[in-house]
Image: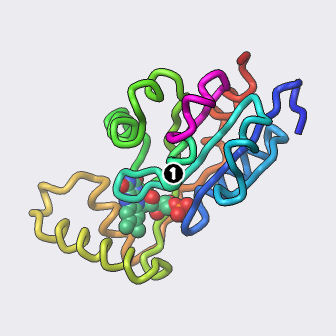
């Protein structure tokens, strides 16, 4: 879709809906086309000037990012924005970890990266995710209470009470980045 002559596409991959919600909010705000990751190819992406990719975080990996990573040499003349969605807050060290785990050195220099907070509902997880998160819970429960960070305490509490940190306001820096000059 035309957006000040800057054609923008928002691509997302989400398991339980938070990354999808953020992608929908961004696409609505900048009047971009919106697609799920499995619905687009490199040829499709090449039709756009700005590519926004959002994926949720699982064990510090951004879901489906291989679409961007394996095609990056054909996309590097475009504006590429990536956002991750996870339970962790956007601390500088979280952002560094996510970048180190997912980006090549070239991507670290050229990709505009943002981290947004999603949600967590233990009851809604599939069987494998439940087992993984159960193991994490046991690991955290083994630590002494005063060794737990506030985020770890929050994570433990969220097993009993689902949490949803998704917040439309937090897309503002991404919208600004999309609307800034190429
Ligand atoms: C097995 C598992 C691993 C996870 N790993 C991380 C992680 O490394 N970092 C993080 O911030 N959140 C992690 N999360 C939390 C999810 O990223 C969070 O629930 C997110 O909102 C899910 O997005 P989605 O609803 O789009 O799938 C993990 C969740 C599960 C179930």
Disc 1: residue Cβ within 8 A of ligand 1's nearest atom: yes
* Relative to 111, 35 lies left or right: right
Name the residue carrying label 1.
85
- Residue 164 seen in render: no
Name the image quarter holding residue 139. bottom left
Query: Which stretch is magenta?
Result: 69-82
Q: Residue at x 42, y 76 (%)?
A: 122
Residue 111 location (% of width, % of height): 53, 28
Please state the total of marks drawn on the protein image: 1
Q: Nearer the viewer, residue 93 or 44?
A: 44
Q: Residue at x 37, y 78 (%)?
A: 128
Q: Nearer the viewer, residue 108 or 57?
A: 108
Q: Residue at x 61, y 44 (%)?
A: 53
- The answer to whether residue 16 is above or below residue 2 is below
**Where's ligand 1: which quadrant?**
bottom left
Residues packed near mark 1 inside 10 Å, few (<14), some (14 to 19) or many (20 plus): many
Residue 8 location (% of width, % of height): 77, 36
- Quadrant where the C terminus sits is top right
- Residue 168 seen in render: yes
* Relative to 11, 135 lies left or right: left
SS for callout 1: strand
Residue 80 location (% of width, % of height): 62, 31
């Amino acid at each position: 879709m035309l957006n000040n002559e800057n054609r923008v596409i928002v691509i997302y991959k989400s398991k339980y809906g938070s990354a999808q919600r953020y992608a929908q909010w961004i696409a609505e705000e900048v009047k971009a086309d919106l697609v799920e990751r499995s619905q687009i190819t490199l040829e499709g992406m090449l039709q756009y000037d700005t590519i926004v990719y959002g994926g949720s975080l699982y064990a510090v990996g951004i879901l489906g990012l291989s679409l961007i990573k394996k095609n990056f040499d054909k996309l590097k003349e475009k504006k590429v924005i990536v956002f991750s969605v996870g339970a962790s807050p956007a601390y500088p060290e979280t952002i560094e970890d996510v970048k180190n785990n997912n980006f090549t050195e070239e991507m670290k220099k050229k990709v505009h990266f943002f981290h947004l907070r999603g949600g967590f509902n233990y009851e809604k997880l599939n069987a494998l995710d439940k087992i993984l998160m159960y193991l994490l819970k046991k690991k955290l429960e083994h630590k002494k209470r005063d060794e737990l960070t506030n985020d770890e305490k929050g994570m433990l509490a969220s097993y009993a009470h689902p949490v949803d940190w998704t917040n439309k306001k937090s897309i503002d820096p991404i919208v600004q980045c999309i609307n800034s000059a190429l």
